[in-house]
Structure formats: structure tokens, C-alpha cells
Image (cartoon, rainbow, N blue to C red):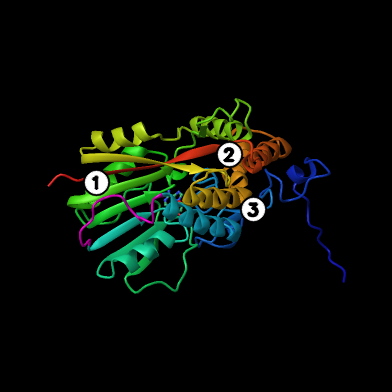
């Protein structure tokens, strides 16, 4: 077949190194011009990222690999926190909101635990399942905008491992407070990223420590410093929540703990690490810190290698903070 017109090659593609392909950073693989739906993605370094709200909004992949990891991480949280889905002392909640719900697994299990409650999960990425309990539903919503929910609406608002998507904590907390009923609760759950050990086996050049330091750097550079326990506690207190309570639980990396529950947590965390280092690190290191792909990948790989090393007995504290809206 003969065509009269030839397709011109984008000069920016020609300028790229010969040995790269479209899975490297910096290629425009956006499908934005093809659709105005929420299903807009870019593929970068072999992973698929959601891009409807722009590539700076959220820097973790949302592909199937990440969805599997999120479900595994949920199981880890349950084990770390003695099977509790929340710490706040809820009594017969009627309406529950989970922001940045991911695969919606927490929202689904809350709907099963509280069959009389309506549970809503929101996210910018449409990765939630269709087959859910009748009292659970999902909405696409950017939690960093003004919320469309009414004042004094939810008995409980929850956000877990959501800090990588938070550009303005004060705004987020004020929306959470506005939409919580007086006497209702707000709870935040995060990984602290302060990898530590109790027996001196973690040296300053430990792969996970180096990895988390780069992550913190990148988040600072984005103007989204990673929150610690004191930060989250202050945030709720300054917003006027009462009875603000903080809890920490150690999450070992690798099956080095003697305690059977913590050993299991460690095994699951190691499995989680198989994709977590890449999920958390690649876009942050390449897009925000400007690293080349090889260097970014090396830091992620070294994190995983350190996690697999039985001679290091490290853990990452998991943190939870909750508070009550005054009556
Ligand atoms: C690390 S995942 C955690 C998912 C879930 N909370 C869990 O614990 O399994 C963070 C989620 O927040 C979502 N997210 C990021 N920025 C957001 C925003 N501005 N508004 C709503 N969701 C957002 C992402 O799409 C992703 O699904």
C-alpha cells in the first residue's frame, strides 16, 4: 500500500538515547487527547501511572501489580494492628468515608463489619471493584479540592497511606472536620518511613535507610514533607479535634522476629517490598530528584536487597492518629 503523506517523527523522541524505549522516563505516552474520561495513564519504566489530574498529583503506579501490593499491604496492616480496621472508638457508625481508597479493600471490609452503615470510598483513580457489599460504593473525587459532601455528614472519616497524595494538609483536615458529625471521628494511618532497629544492625548506608532518605528528600522538594506521628497529632489538635490519640506499631522487614505474629508480618512485608520499593521510588527519584533511570533503579534494588538480608533486623513504625470532632 502506498501513502502520500509520511508521519513526521517527534524531534524529542529522536533526541533520546538509542538504547531507551518507551518504558523509560520522559516520553509522552499520555492518552489524554484520546479520551476525556478518568482512564488516562502514562507508562513509565515498565509501570502504569494514572495521569488524569497531571503527573505530579500522585507519583505511584496504579496498575495491577500495585493493586495486588495494596491488598497485601492491607493484610499486613490488619496483622500489625491485631486485626483492627481502626483505632477510633466507633459505636454504630451510620456513614463512613475512606479517602484515597485505592482498591477499596478497607472500605469493603468496613462495610462488612458495619452492615448498617453506608461506606463510601473516594479516589482519583478508578481501580475499585464492582462486586462490593450493598452498603459500600465508590466515587471518583480529588480529595485535595473542596469536597462536595455536606457539613456534619460522616460519623467516621479515614485515610490510610494517603500522604503521598496530600499537597495541603490543613485544607484536607479542614474538609475532614467540616464533613464529620459532631462527636464523630477522623483517623489517619501512615507508614512513618523512619526505618530503625533495636540491635544496631542497621548502618547509615543500609539500603532501606538510603532509599527512605531519598524518598523524604523528594517529598520535601515537592513541598509535601513526609508526616511523622507528632506532625499528624499536631495537625488534628490544631484543627480543634478532641481526645487526639496516637498509636505506633513496629512492622519488621523480613522474618527475623521470634514472635510468630511479627515473623509473619516480616515475611509479608518482604513480599510487599518486592514491588514496593519500585512503586514508591521510581517516579519520585526520576521526575522529582532528576535521577537517571539506572540510578533510581539501583536505589530501589538496594532497598530490596537490604530487606532480604537476614543480618539486618529493621522495622518501620506504622502510625495511627485519631481525634473526635467537638460536640
Ligand atoms: C498508597 S494508595 C493507598 C490506598 C488505600 N488507602 C490503602 O490503604 O490500601 C494511595 C491512594 O490515594 C489515591 N490518591 C492520590 N491522590 C489523591 C487525591 N488527591 N484524591 C483522592 N485520591 C488520591 C491514589 O490514587 C491511591 O489509590
x, y (%) of residue 62?
55, 55
Please report the residue visible at 63 percent of the width from the left and 34 percent of the height from the top: 207
Q: Mark 2 or mark 1, which has the lower sequence index?
A: 1
Q: What range is drawn magenta here? A: 81-93
Q: Mark 3 or mark 2, which has the lower sequence index?
A: 3
Q: Is residue 240 left or right of residue 1?
A: left
Please report the residue visible at 28 percent of the width from the left and 48 percent of the height from the top: 186
Give the residue furthest to the right.
2
Q: What residue does disc 1 label?
A: 177
Badge 3 element: strand
Number of marks? 3
Q: Is residue 90 left or right of residue 161?
A: left
Q: What residue does disc 2 label?
A: 284
Q: Is residue 198 left or right of residue 311?
A: left
Q: Along the line of sight, which residue is nearer the eye, 203 or 218?
A: 203
Q: Main secondary structure of the magenta part?
A: loop
Label 2 to label 1: alpha-carbon separation: 30 Å
x, y (%) of residue 167?
42, 39
Amino acid at each position: 500500500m502506498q501513502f502520500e503523506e509520511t508521519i513526521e517523527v517527534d524531534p524529542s523522541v529522536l533526541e533520546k538515547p538509542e538504547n531507551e524505549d518507551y518504558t523509560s522516563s520522559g516520553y509522552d505516552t499520555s492518552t489524554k487527547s484520546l479520551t476525556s474520561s478518568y482512564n488516562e495513564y502514562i507508562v513509565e519504566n515498565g509501570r502504569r501511572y494514572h495521569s488524569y489530574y497531571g503527573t505530579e498529583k500522585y507519583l505511584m503506579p496504579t496498575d495491577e501489580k500495585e493493586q495486588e501490593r495494596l491488598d497485601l499491604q492491607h493484610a499486613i496492616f490488619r496483622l500489625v494492628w491485631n486485626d483492627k480496621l481502626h483505632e477510633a472508638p466507633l459505636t454504630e457508625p451510620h456513614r463512613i468515608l475512606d479517602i484515597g481508597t485505592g482498591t477499596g479493600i478497607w472500605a469493603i471490609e468496613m462495610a462488612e463489619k458495619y452492615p448498617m452503615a453506608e461506606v463510601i470510598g473516594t479516589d482519583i483513580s478508578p481501580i475499585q471493584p464492582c462486586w462490593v457489599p450493598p452498603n459500600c460504593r465508590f466515587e471518583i473525587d480529588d480529595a485535595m479540592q473542596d469536597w462536595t459532601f455536606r457539613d456534619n455528614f460522616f460519623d467516621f472519616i479515614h485515610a490510610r497511606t494517603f500522604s503521598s497524595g496530600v499537597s495541603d494538609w490543613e485544607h484536607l483536615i479542614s474538609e475532614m472536620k467540616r464533613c464529620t458529625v459532631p462527636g464523630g471521628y477522623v483517623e489517619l494511618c501512615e507508614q512513618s518511613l523512619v526505618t530503625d532497629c533495636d540491635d544496631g544492625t542497621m548502618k547509615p548506608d543500609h539500603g532501606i535507610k538510603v532509599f527512605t532518605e531519598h524518598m523524604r528528600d523528594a517529598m520535601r522538594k515537592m513541598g509535601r514533607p513526609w508526616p511523622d506521628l507528632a506532625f499528624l497529632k499536631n495537625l488534628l489538635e490544631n484543627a480543634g479535634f478532641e481526645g487526639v490519640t496516637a498509636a505506633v506499631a513496629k512492622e519488621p522487614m523480613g522474618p527475623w522476629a521470634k514472635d510468630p505474629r511479627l515473623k509473619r508480618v516480616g515475611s509479608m512485608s518482604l513480599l510487599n517490598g518486592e514491588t514496593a520499593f519500585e512503586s514508591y521510588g521510581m517516579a519520585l527519584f526520576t521526575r522529582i530528584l532528576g535521577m537517571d533511570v539506572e540510578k533510581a533503579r539501583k536505589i530501589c534494588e538496594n532497598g530490596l536487597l537490604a530487606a532480604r538480608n537476614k543480618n539486618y533486623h529493621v522495622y518501620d513504625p506504622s502510625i495511627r492518629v485519631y481525634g473526635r470532632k467537638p460536640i
